[in-house]
Image (spheres, rainbow, N blue to C red):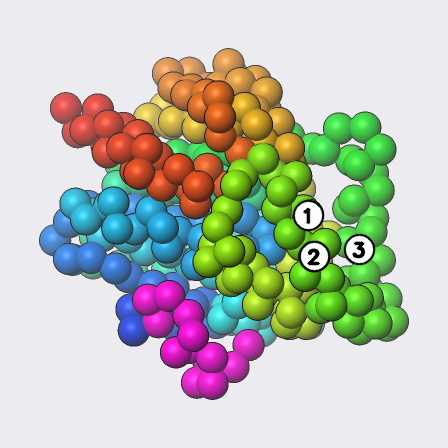
Amino acid sequence: MNWEKEKYDWPFWESSNFFQTENCIWHYQIIGEEDKPILFMIHGAGASSHSWTNIIEYLVDYQVVSVDLPGHRFSKTLTNKSLDPSIIISDLIRLSNNLKQNPSIFIGHSIGAVIAIQLAYYVNKKGLQTSAISINGALEKFEGPAGTIFPLMAKFLNWNPLSKYWVKLFNSAENSLKKLLSLSGSNLSEKDIDPYVKLMGNSTHIKGTLALISNWNIKNLDGILMQINFPLLFLAGERDGIVPAVNSVRASKKTPGSKLILIADGGHLLHEEKSKSIAMEIGSFYKSIIK
């Protein structure tokens, strides 16, 4: 996406920064006073840093740092290959090291939760204290036929030379996008849906999403969960139709000392539909870890 042409139509564009590695030009935003504790936020596949817009107004006691994943919105992949998750995590550690202070909490949604947990794990291994929050984390493989078909479809669309025609089809599928969002179990306003419509209307963003999904794996996550020795909070909506809440339940049982909060009327996009209550949970978690 073209930053100079499109930035004025995006939330908090004036807070945007860019950080370049050999793998990616990372777009990230810093919102809030620099002397406040940092919340480092990672969105899910197909979204962007815009997904934290609603919750930011309730996080005035923190400095929020939110990134766009590779190929998503304004983050541009510099290699011809999709980035391996380990490269993404390594780059984001470098980005976090570039901040003026160490993040207090890494917060991730869906696939972003897997990244947030691993970021906190490796930062702690380096002797810096931090913690993590998983919001409807995609902590397991999809079950049943979807576990095979969905990743294969992403690989096909990502690799196939005819994928531009599939992209064109996605671009015209605003109604289908709204149906998908309704399946998430989250009731979003038209204002909240509009950024997703814009994202799905952009071929670069769609290709970035497909590249991320086609190259995704969580093979090391279980081992990491069992070794965690830092505060970790799992938040899960019981109405989530994309990532079942039981994923978070099972992950919490594997993780020593972790905390699980289930939200009965919450869907997949918890942080967007229930921004104030999720911000309160974040605040309570932060207070518990600084005691």
**Image position of 284 with respect to 166: above or below:** above
Residue placed at 52% from the left, 81% from the top?
2
Q: Position of residue 169 (x, y in %)?
A: 79, 67
- Relative horizontal placement of residue 114, taking residue 168 as reference (left or right): left
Say the numbered circle drawn on residue 155.
3
**Image position of 212 with respect to 147: above or below:** below
- Residue 17 in which image quadrant: bottom left
**Image position of 7 with respect to 31: above or below:** below
Residue matched to label 1? 179
Residue placed at 61% from the left, 39% from the top?
184
Dominant SS of magenta comes to helix
Mark 3 and mark 2 residues within 8 Å of each other at the beta carbon: no
Q: Is residue 5 magenta?
A: yes
Q: Position of residue 42 (x, y in %)?
A: 44, 50
Measured Cα–Cα span from mark 3 to mark 2: 24 Å
Residue matched to label 2? 175
Q: Amino acid at mark 3?
A: Lys
Q: Earlier in the sequence, mark 3 or mark 2?
A: 3
Mark 1 and mark 2 residues within 8 Å of each other at the beta carbon: yes
Instruction: Name the residue nearer the viewer: 121 or 165.
Output: 165
Q: Position of residue 32 (x, y in %)?
A: 20, 57
Q: Amino acid at mark 2?
A: Asn
Task: Count residues near mark 2 (Cα–Cα under 10 Å), then give few for <14, some for 14-19, many for 20+.
Answer: few
Query: Start and end of the magenta stretch?
Result: 1-13
Q: Amino acid at mark 1?
A: Lys
Q: What is the quadrant of the N terminus in the image? A: bottom right
